[in-house]
Image (cartoon, grey):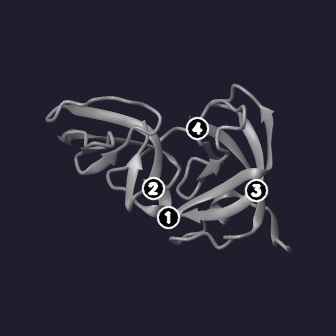
Amino acid sequence: TVVSSAGTLSISDIQGEGADSPYIGQNVTTSGYVTARAEYGFFIQDAEASWSGIWILDYGNQSVNIGDEVEVTGMVEEYYNLTEIDVTSGNVSVLSTGNPLYNPILIDSVEEAYESVLVTVSGVCDGAPNEYGEWTLSGIWIDDLMYEFTPVVGEPYTITGPLYYSYDEYKVEP
């Protein structure tokens, strides 16, 4: 089997500026700061800008913490339109620990450019949680991938977390 390797790239290069990564099916190396951790992976970001975050799929096998600077090598995949780097057959190296995170970007609408980027949204809860723990904040979906919370409909909230994409919706993951 021959797998193409694109070498070392910035996260924005890997994300591209469209719906799909221009590097699907290729091995890449990139680095960034861990901004959030979930059961099956973690988010990294390399700038305080759009197109600067990416989901790292590791199935919980890596020992990384929020604030770690990491270098990852793995296969670029689009999982139901979420750009990710699968490192299960790759490598993750912690370069430094305890680093400050980039400031979250304040957004009022969700879009591809902020996929996996640390964002902040504010608004009023206008939809109670559904059976999957998802609810809406002034029309923006909030999910419980990493943090469970039951909001009160009609109450204002400010939520910070990476923007995730699943089941045809962008969702902020507190």
> Which residue corresponds to mark 1?
80
Disc on the earlier residue, 2 or 4 = 4
- Residue shown at 29% from the left, 50% from the top: 140
- Residue shown at 52% from the left, 56% from the top: 50
Question: Which numbered mark, 1 or 4, is in the foreground of this view?
Answer: 1
Question: Which numbered mark, 2 or 4, is in the foreground of this view?
Answer: 2
> Which residue corresponds to mark 4?
35
Q: Amino acid at mark 2?
A: Tyr
Local secondary structure at mark 2: strand
Contact, mark 2 vs mark 3 (Cβ under 8 Å):
no
Local secondary structure at mark 1: loop
**In the rendered image, which quarter contains the N terminus?**
bottom right
Disc on the earlier residue, 2 or 3 = 3
Q: CA distance from mark 2 to mark 3?
A: 20 Å
Instruction: Please identify the residue farthest to the right as the structure is shown.
Output: 2
- Residue shown at 63% from the left, 61% from the top: 12
Q: Amino acid at mark 1?
A: Tyr
Instruction: Please identify the residue farthest to the top as the structure is shown.
Output: 98
Q: CA distance from mark 3 to mark 1?
A: 18 Å
Disc on the earlier residue, 4 or 3 = 4
Disc on the earlier residue, 2 or 1 = 1
Local secondary structure at mark 4: strand
112 relative position to 37: left or right: left
Contact, mark 2 vs mark 4 (Cβ under 8 Å):
no
Which circle marks residue 165 in the picture? 2
